[in-house]
Image: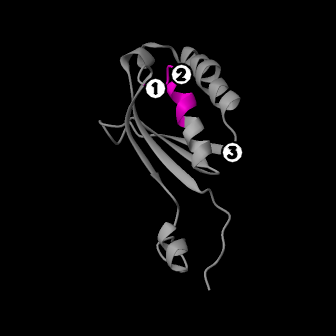
Amino acid sequence: MPTKEAEATVTAFILVKSTPEWLAMTVQERVDAFTTQVVSAIEAKTTGVRSRFYDTEFYSARVTDVWVWEADDHRAYQLLIDALRETPFWDRYFEVVDLLVGTENGYARTYGLDPVATITT
């Protein structure tokens, strides 16, 4: 019998590349811009979303960062993207290279299986 896990319905990997405008700012200016312009918009316009941010510029020339989002449902994810698109994050501070959206272990839920591809050693 499959194990029931608490998990987000929607997971999105937003692959971005920083722009020259973003890189021209000081570190403090970036923090201030991100918290006042991006985070505040997300907090004002969404509920049921969580994120993690990964730096990748030292491994990839195409993508400098990956922002991983978990959303309670597709509506929460849609509101998140709408909120981000209304901020300078989207195509001003960062070029959105790709959006990869899925559900964790969807195949297992579809076929009533244990999630055999999720491995912990």
* Rendering quarter of residue 29: top right
Badge 1: few (under 14), some or many (20 or more) residues near its Cα, within 10 Å?
some
Secondary structure beneath label 2: loop
**101 up-or-down from 32: above or below:** below
Amino acid type, callout 2: Thr
Q: What is the residue that sits farthest to the left in this orientation?
A: 61
Residue 107 in view in this figure: yes
106 left or right of 17? Answer: right
What amino acid is labelled 1 in the image?
Trp
Residue 82 in the magenta stretch? The answer is yes
Disc 3 target residue = 48
Mark pair 3, 2: CA separation: 19 Å
Vertical placement of 4 versus 16: above or below? below
Which residue is label 2 attached to?
87
At a point 64% along the width and 19% down the height, the residue shown is: 36
Magenta stretch holds residue 60: no
**Left or right: where does residue 46 sit relative to residue 25?**
right
- Could you say whether the residue bearing mark 1 is in a helix, strand or loop? loop
Residue 114 horizontal side relative to residue 57, left or right: right
Read off the magenta span: 81-90
Question: Observer-nearest residue: 19 or 112?
Answer: 112
Q: Identify the residue at horizontal 68%, vertical 45% (top origin).
A: 48
Residue 90 badge: 1
Disc 3 and disc 1: Cα gap in Å? 21 Å
Residue at left offset 66%, top offset 69%:
5
Closest to the observer: 117 or 73?
Answer: 73
On screen, residue 113 above or below 68: below
Residue furthest to the bottom in view is: 1
Residue drawn where x is 70% and y is 40% of the image: 47
